[in-house]
Image (tube, coloured by chain):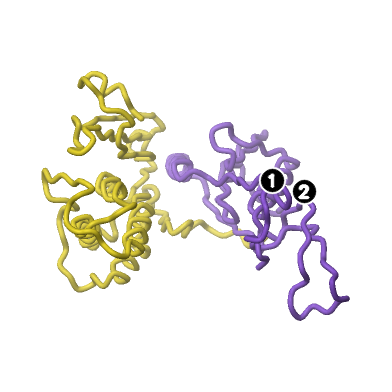
Amino acid sequence: MKDLRPLSYFLGLEILSLSNGLFLSQAKYASDLVSRVGLSDSKIEHTPLEPNVRFTPQDGTLVNDATLYLHLVGSLIYLTMTQTYISYNVHLVSQFMASPRTTHYAVVFRIIRCIKGTLFYGLHYSAASPLILRAYSDADWAGDPSDRRSTTGFCTFLRDSLISWRSKKQTLAAQSSMKLNIVLR
Amino acid sequence: MAKGLTQEYGIHYEETFAPIARITSVRTLLAIVATCKWRLTQMDVKNAFLKGELEEEVYMRPPPGYTCQENKVCRLRKALYGIKQAPKAWFAKFQKTITQFNFSSSGHDSALFTRKTYNGTVVLLLYVDDMIITGDDSVGIEELKKFL
């Protein structure tokens, strides 16, 4: 076994000790991703998705080689470790892993252009935050036009510190908005 | 690197699952550390997968450059990089060792180990060969460091 040292870099996670707590980011991982896809000089997008757009497995034309798509979506999933705001969008593009189409590709690139503007964003865990657990959840109403299933989102806080979140499609088609909010997985 | 893809299930290996820390555990631990103002340290294990001990009988053709009688094979006593059960063997070895040092594995995340003493608590979170060590028992952390 080797050297015990102050924690600064763990699983691609940059951990910064501040006077008022800890700050977690993935700036290096994110900027590597942006330069790998050659988007270093492109303009920054302010939102990861256009409002009110819906995607289906039949949009656009089929992409011949899905390898890059799988690769990028994998990297984005890893980035959701600190970049919470892309959770829904990454969850969306990951549904088309089996046969991605040009429109889905465009969304992936838009997410990456958006990340370019938030490279140094991350999670702040305040030293002043008491350890009180709080959780929030919500669901859309049959948000997917092709199978009418709803998507659930939840997030869990230890007072001010966000520790867990997820965006996930429900496993069944809810028949009422009541049931929709009961079903979590 | 051994050629693990020639191994067959049931003959050369049984189980291959090895737990790693959930990312939520990592974040939760860090949030707690921030509030409690604990000292955060990390440690990585060099050549971790070589430390695992094999339960199964595994034979390997000697690597090129290793001179021995022809048609002889060698039996592996410890795990090698590339064989399928290496991660599991490593985790089992780590768990056994750390348990001897009075650490217990959490019921919610088996890669999270804690030790409570008179002085306080030491927490260890294992992610394959990387670990976070923290707690309010600085003596305990030093002891753990020596022990590992």
User: What's the CA distance linking mark 2 and mark 1?
Assistant: 9 Å
Instruction: Kindly indicate which chain is depicted in yellow in the rendered structure.
Output: A
Q: Chain of mark 2?
A: B
Q: The C terminus of chain B lies in which quarter of the figure?
A: bottom right
Q: Chain of mark 1?
A: B
* Amino acid type of the residue tagged 2 in the rendering: Glu
Query: Badge 1 is on which residue?
Result: B14
As helix, strand or loop, the secondary structure at mark 1 comes to loop
* Amino acid type of the residue tagged 1 in the rendering: Glu
Residue A16, percent from left and from top: 40, 56
Residue located at (76% from left, 58% from top): B78
Name the outermost residue toward the right.
B69
**In the image, is A130 to the left or to the right of A7?**
left
Up-down: is A154 above or below A35? Answer: above
Residue A136, percent from left and from top: 29, 30
- Which of these two is toward me, A183 or A96? A96
